[in-house]
Amino acid sequence: MSAREAILGRVRASLGRGRLDVDKSAELDARLNAPIANLVPARGQVSGAAAVEDFIQMTLGAAATLEEVATDLEIPAAIARYLASENLPARLVQTQEIADRLDWDAVPQVETRSGPAVSEDEVGLAMALAGVAETGTLILRSGVQAPTTVNFLPDTHIVVLRRDDVVGGYEEAWARLRETCLDADGRLPRTVNMITGPSRTGDIEQTLQLGAHGPRRLHVVLVG
């Protein structure tokens, strides 16, 4: 018996329930494999250019910054400009997922490495699975080529997002996750991060503080 089965067995015992019968188990499997969306707000029902425009406005409204570029070839130069404009060090840690897409030769002044972030890293670069127009939220998955530390340890977080990956609502983002991110055993990523603007809190004397639990800067490079 696996640890998972042992835990679920104890939960069933505490509820006074046995294992589900075959019909009920099949019903639940069908519901999980083909989930039905609940009521979606109007601002989550947009698509195409309207969704992109809404995403941009919501992102800027959440105190993040954003630059649009046409192709992947322009991304390194755009990041170099951003680092210079914010007087940040010209070095960063990137996920392997985004490193495989970029050619840094055009901006040799920027020092890059790939892998998990450590406490000394000041800038992290990652790739978003999707952007949600409804709230200006970025969806990032974890994995061997996309360690979550890159999203949270550095003080500055830069995220690359393709225009084609902007969706209207969260339901579309989760559907995209199920369609594209299952591993060989049919499992979802261990962690899915939903990031809206830089880290912030108002718990201390009702004063807004940026960077309390993560990056104090969030910059989006929108491609396409």
Image (cartoon, rainbow, N blue to C red):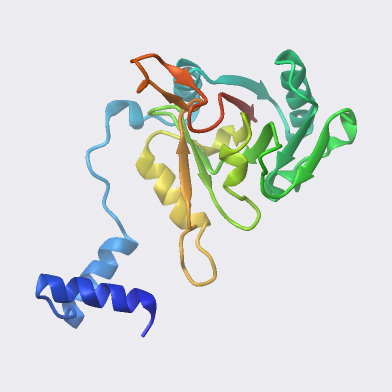
Q: Give the x, y percent position of residue 107.
A: 87, 29
Compare residues 47 and 116 and report the one nearer the observer.
116
Q: Is residue 205 visible?
A: yes
134 relative position to 163: left or right: left
In the displayed structure, would residue 98 be above or below residue 25?
A: above
> Residue, x 65% and y 22% (percent of image)?
68
- Quarter of the image for the N terminus: give it: bottom left
Quadrant assignment, res 171: top left
Compare residues 212 and 152 and report the one nearer the observer.
212
Q: Give the x, y percent position of residue 65.
A: 58, 19
- Quarter of the image for the C terminus: give it: top right
> Residue, x 41% and y 16% (percent of image)?
208
17 relative position to 135: left or right: left
In the displayed structure, would residue 182 be above or below residue 164?
A: below
Compare residues 163 and 206 and report the one nearer the observer.
206
> Residue, x 70% and y 36% (percent of image)?
121
Give the total number of marks visible in the rendering: 0
Query: In this view, which residue lies farthest toward the bottom?
Result: 1
Q: Is residue 62 visible?
A: no
> Residue, x 40% and y 43% (percent of image)?
172
In the displayed structure, would residue 16 be above or below residue 60?
A: below
Query: In this view, which residue lies farthest toward the left?
Result: 16
Query: In this view, which residue lies farthest toward the front?
Result: 205
Q: Give the x, y percent position of residue 164.
A: 56, 37
Q: Give the x, y percent position of residue 49.
A: 50, 25
Quadrant assignment, res 223: top right
Compare residues 62 and 39 and report the one nearer the observer.
62
203 relative position to 103: left or right: left
In the displayed structure, would residue 11 be above or below residue 125?
A: below
